[in-house]
Image (cartoon, rainbow, N blue to C red):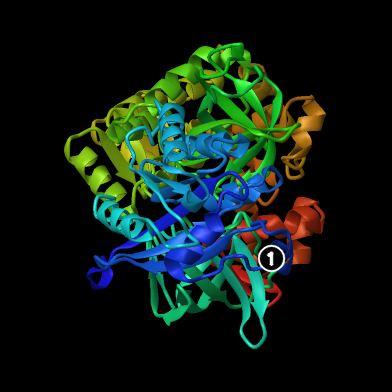
């Protein structure tokens, strides 16, 4: 941790008017009600922030979240990334509707630590306080707060505040700090403009760190910008670390281009998605049954999106039950494996459940007929073993993923992924080609696929010399480097032969006789020989003979490779015709030193359309040498 400091994010939760904001002011001296409307109404509408320097040296950022049901979505925007929750219950009122809802949110978001704070102690007697304590203990049974300390306080008189600070301080050292190794992830909860500075965004830094001058990506839009300056807890700093409440001043972006729900991240690691495969839990307090197609408000980090739930391993989900599901969203989110989420019912909009993201980037929409395949994948993804998940992805999608992709798919830092890849390569479980990852047996499998593809090509086109390497690569859908390696090994073992970018099985000889091409070869030859010096253009054979152009090209190549035909411009000539033209040229140069185009046309009785390509052909062989508009004799024999 930088400078040996530790950073902590504390969140408040609890029913409206149970004293969350007043408690924070008593702890920090900061009033987190930022807006005039909040002051008038005496309630927190949006997120408020404060900071607290604990006696042991930990610097805590405190997120004050609204308790009123109308502002629950604002509460959800602040509840992610909380290390420790101060769960507030007013001693004079006890458990109330939003107390239950906020507890569900904390449970679904995977909050692990908390302190129960009984506020307004000064308004009740000791007997009543004991009753509320008992009611609270009963209410919290079976939750993450079951064995948490319960501390009564009075923000008004200050009674219990010192004890609360001491307890926060004690717990702060038990909480594992957020990882600095991971990529930067900063979910935006506010975006605004400061005159003379430009756009500023704020959020709780979930992972990684960042510095002034760094380039960051705003997702899901994918806009890349630079950080001009950074503030942490109201003070200008050069760096910000995971666990800190952070404000970034961004260059070249308007406040309209970055908003609550967006994510500021290290560029080129994360992809947005409009669907996620999840492990979903329906709250035991939910008074409904969820079936596929159920509309919800989906809350992930600071973003709220409308979506629909599709159950995978059952037809309906009852309160208190858990299942696998796909949630399809109306807008993109930027999910990472193991991220937590909360769902609220569409209408009336109340918290009904949540869970954990298993596949942040599903390839396609879930369909019931593929249920078994989906469940196979999700059972592996729901296990703790990230190595097994990594191998599963590589085996299921050979060559699809690079190292970078696994930062999102299994929620590891780039360095951790690199180490895992190296370990898997050393163990002989995976291979890497051009940064793409493959299972270890893939090369051997690919060799067999290459051989069978080439063999099938020979059967389909028995007069062809072989398959072009690029066509082979396209058919197999592999990267050039991997195909090159496989071909090299097959050629070295003499199972394949390569010549001029064309691959064939060793010992294969093209033959037209007895194949579907026998008749076509005969017809093409007849057309060429009967046309003498003026054959049809190659492309015309297709319409003249009513056959596919591809078949014509293969026949043309066969005639050139196996029967000595010559391709001249857009034409193909019989070897005897080329021999006859060569004799005519010899006769001419026995009498004259130069040859004009006109003379050549007259000898053969052809137009410029044929004369120019033929002369250029003999230029290319060196038999003629062009001098201005005339030719002289070259190596013509």
Q: Residue at x 43, y 60 (%)?
A: 184
The vertical placement of 637 against 297, above or below, is below
Q: Which residue is drawn at 55% across and 14% down?
A: 371
SS for dot 1: helix
User: Residue 64 versus residue 125: which sits nearer the camera?
Assistant: 125
Q: In which quarter of the image is residue 111?
A: top left
Please say whether residue 423 is visible from this viewpoint: yes
The N terminus is located in which quarter?
Answer: bottom left
User: Residue 314 versus residue 495: which sits nearer the camera?
Assistant: 314
Q: Mark 1 points at which residue?
A: 39
Please say whether residue 338 is visible from this viewpoint: no
Residue 38 is situated, as x and y percent measured from the top left of the image, at 69, 62
User: Residue 312 versus residue 33: which sits nearer the camera?
Assistant: 33
The vertical placement of 162 against 145, above or below, is below
Q: Quadrant of residue 554?
A: top right
Q: Which residue is drawn at 80% across and 59% down?
A: 608
Residue 473 is situated, as x and y percent measured from the top left of the image, at 48, 37
């Amino acid at each position: 941790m930088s400078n040996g400091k530790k950073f902590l994010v504390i969140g408040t939760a609890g029913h409206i008017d149970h004293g969350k904001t007043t408690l924070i002011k008593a702890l920090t001296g900061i009033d987190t009600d930022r807006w005039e409307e909040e002051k008038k109404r005496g309630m927190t509408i949006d997120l408020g922030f404060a900071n607290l320097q604990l006696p042991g040296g930990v610097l805590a950022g405190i997120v004050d979240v609204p308790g009123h049901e109308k502002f629950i979505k604002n509460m959800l925007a602040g509840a992610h990334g909380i290390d420790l929750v101060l769960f507030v219950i007013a001693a004079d009122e006890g458990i109330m509707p939003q107390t239950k809802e906020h507890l569900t949110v904390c449970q679904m978001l995977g909050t692990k630590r908390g302190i129960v704070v009984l506020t307004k102690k000064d308004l009740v007697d000791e007997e009543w306080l004991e009753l509320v304590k008992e009611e609270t203990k009963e209410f919290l049974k079976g939750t993450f707060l079951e064995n948490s300390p319960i501390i009564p306080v009075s923000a008004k008189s200050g009674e219990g505040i010192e004890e609360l600070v001491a307890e926060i301080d004690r717990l702060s050292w038990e909480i594992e700090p957020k990882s600095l190794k991971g990529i930067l992830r900063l979910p935006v909860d506010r975006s605004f403009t400061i005159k003379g500075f430009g756009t500023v965004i704020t959020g709780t830094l979930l992972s990684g760190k960042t510095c002034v001058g760094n380039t960051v990506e705003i997702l899901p839009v994918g806009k890349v910008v630079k950080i001009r300056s950074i503030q942490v807890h109201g003070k200008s700093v050069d760096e910000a670390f995971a666990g800190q409440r952070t404000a970034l001043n961004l260059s070249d972006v308007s406040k309209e281009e970055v908003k609550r729900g967006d994510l500021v991240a290290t560029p080129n690691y994360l992809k947005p998605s409009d669907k996620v495969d999840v492990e979903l839990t329906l709250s035991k307090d939910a008074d409904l049954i969820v079936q596929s197609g159920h509309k919800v408000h989906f809350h992930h980090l600071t973003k709220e999106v409308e979506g629909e739930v599709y159950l995978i391993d059952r037809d309906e989900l009852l309160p208190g039950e858990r299942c696998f599901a796909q949630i399809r969203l109306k807008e993109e989110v930027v999910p990472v494996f193991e991220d937590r989420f909360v769902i609220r019912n569409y209408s009336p909009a109340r918290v009904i459940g949540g869970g954990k993201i298993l596949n942040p980037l599903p390839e396609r929409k879930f369909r019931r007929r593929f249920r078994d395949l989906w469940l196979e994948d999700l059972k592996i993804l729901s296990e703790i073993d990230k190595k097994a998940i990594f191998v599963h992805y590589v085996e299921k999608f050979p060559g699809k993923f690079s190292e970078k992709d696994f930062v999102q798919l299994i929620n590891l830092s780039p360095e951790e992924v690199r180490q895992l890849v190296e370990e898997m390569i050393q163990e002989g479980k995976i291979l890497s080609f051009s940064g793409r990852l493959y299972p270890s047996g893939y090369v051997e499998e690919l060799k067999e696929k290459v051989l069978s593809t080439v063999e099938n090509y020979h059967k389909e086109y028995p007069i062809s010399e072989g398959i072009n390497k690029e066509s082979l690569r396209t058919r197999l859908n592999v990267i050039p480097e991997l195909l090159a390696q496989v071909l090299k090994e097959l050629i070295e073992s003499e199972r394949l032969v390569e010549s001029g970018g064309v691959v064939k099985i060793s010992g294969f000889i093209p033959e037209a006789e007895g194949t579907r091409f026998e008749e076509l070869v005969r017809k093409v030859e007849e057309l060429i020989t009967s046309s003498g010096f003026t054959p049809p253009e190659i492309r015309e054979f297709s319409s003249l003979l009513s056959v596919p152009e591809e078949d014509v090209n293969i026949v043309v190549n066969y005639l050139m490779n196996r029967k000595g035909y010559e391709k001249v411009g857009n034409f193909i000539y019989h070897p005897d015709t080329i021999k006859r033209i060569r004799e005519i040229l010899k006769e001419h140069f026995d009498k004259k030193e130069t040859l004009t185009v006109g003379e050549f046309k007259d000898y053969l009785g052809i137009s410029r359309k044929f004369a120019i390509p033929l002369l250029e052909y003999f230029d290319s062989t060196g038999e003629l040498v062009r001098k201005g508009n005339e030719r002289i004799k070259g190596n013509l024999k």
